[in-house]
Image (spheres, rainbow, N blue to C red):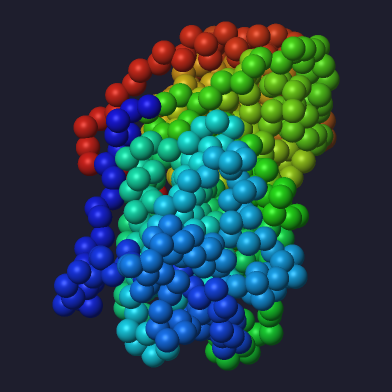
Amino acid sequence: MPKSPGAGPVAPGRSRRQAGEDGGGARAGTASGSSPEPSAAPAAAEVPSAAGGQGAGAGARRPGGTLPGRDAADGDALTALRARRAAALGGGGPERLARQRAQGKRTARERLDLLFDPGTFTELGLHVLHRGTDFDLPGRDIPGDAVVTGFGRVDGRTVFAFSQDFTAAGGTLGEMHARKIVSLQEMATRSGAPLVGINDSGGARIQEGVDALDGFARIFRGNVMASGVVPQVSVIVGPCAGGAVYSPALTDFVFMVRDIGYMYITGPEVVRAYLGQQVDHSGLGGGDVHAQRSGVCHFLEADEPACFAAVRRLLGYLPANNLEDPPVAPAPHVAPEGAALRGVVPADPGKAYDVRTVIARLLDPGSFLEAHALWAENAVVGFARLEGRPLGVVANQPKVKAGCLDIDCSDKIARFVRTCDAFNLPVLTLVDTPGYLPGTDQEHRGIIRHGAKVLYAYAEATVPKVSLVLRKAYGGAYIAMCSRGLGADLAAAWPGAEIAVMGAEGACNIIFRAEIQRATDPESVRAARTAEYRAAFAHPYVAAARQYVDAVLDPAESRGWLHAVLEVLRSKRQEAPARKHGNEPA
């Protein structure tokens, strides 16, 4: 483990209220937990406001302003400790815990049990309490300030995590809640270990005002400082509203659970009031919306156990930090039969097929974990293994929009390539695309700048990059899909591949337009010229002659060839130019 895989975020400074207090930090360490018999809280505390904020009424009011053990200096210290722990571990109390489960949701600690190997979680900040002095906060304890933080192990590897507790003040974020998360971000970054954030919160704690907003800002900065240093994963298993949505958006991967997780900037009430649109939480920002339409969600799962199992699986492909190699799994006992790749890709360039079949037969059986499976489906991205070693896979999907590149799939590819590059995963690109999707909609929405993101991501990446042209590779899309000129270390093609400026029919309609127009039988001339063009260019050998393609492979040879070249490229070293940072297309 490297001592410091990246510069950790700056520790948060003292707020205006803190600056005027003596011993403020000591107070945060002495006021802990809630009363063993929490009083009822206002029902409004569990309903997010239109802007995502929420009251803190779900905390328990201290009887007589005391906590278990607060006046026990002369009593049994261990008894007082046990009482404090019991109060803190009780969350919002039995009633609220039962209500959480009745909604089909796990509690904050149950979620951590699903994430970590049994018995490995170590909690930090159990006794932290808020320091709010306004409205109903004085004398009210919110256990752990509504978030559980700590670290444990996932498949034996250290992982940090926080889990917001909706049963305590609706999981709202205040000053100390944010401080616990920022402290965890800093520790994860310094230690070089992944960070998982489990989000179930009503948003900013209104009673703490600007302190809550400052807390969000510090969390966002922590996300940015950790970006590309340690993997960051967000899990949305409840509301994530208002400014709170930007922390997951700044992380590497977002998981959502259908029907219980939702994200939006402004809630349904605001949408109804200002736009007159009738929409519910799920329709505005549910898992299906973000997995299929917005692209915010990378992985959508049916329930919480499936979700956390998927998080654990994802972490198995990623290194602990940017200075380590990805974890290696045992090679498969039975390698895929190479001959099974023959015939998967139809010879007819106009016939569709599912590129996932190629991935399944080319790489280790059952190893492909697809990201963004429901969004921008004309491209397929995900993680897989080849002889046990993880790699990233990018592929055009001919059965959706013929595999054309468009705005959404350009964003999808570019983001995934940069993630692989940040965490030392080789990138395998499977190419079968006729070009960029034409039309006024794409042009007006900015296909130029979005398409440029793919070029930027591939050209910038320094990890091993290998491309395999399965069938069509035309024009600008051929360049963008990690061509040799753009920076592929090695490229190969199958014998039926067509690498050209455009398809034969389109090329002939331009090159031989005058001749076709003059002909007494235009169609026969067009057919003859098309066949001539196809014979001259619709194959991989022109590119191979100029070493734009390093090998033309029998599909049955592809797995062995890929394994050999990726083994050689494992020792690749490439230094980027000295600069502060590049300026990626927006």
Q: Nearer the viewer, residue 507 or 422?
A: 422
Could you say which quadrant of the image residue 279 lies in? bottom right
Q: Is residue 356 visible?
A: yes
Q: Is residue 545 above or below residue 182?
A: above
Q: Is residue 113 above or below residue 154?
A: below
Q: Position of residue 218 (x, y in %)?
A: 32, 61
Q: Is residue 298 above or below residue 22?
A: above
Say how many tags the image has. 0
Q: Position of residue 9 (x, y in %)?
A: 28, 50
Could you say which quadrant of the image residue 504 lies in? top right
Q: Position of residue 472 (x, y in %)?
A: 67, 29
Is 124 left or right of 501, judged from the image as shown?
Answer: left
Is 452 left or right of 299, judged from the image as shown?
Answer: left
Quarter of the image where the C terminus is located:
bottom left
Q: Residue at x 53, y 58 (%)?
A: 163
Q: Is residue 217 visible?
A: no
Q: Residue at x 56, y 26 (%)?
A: 391
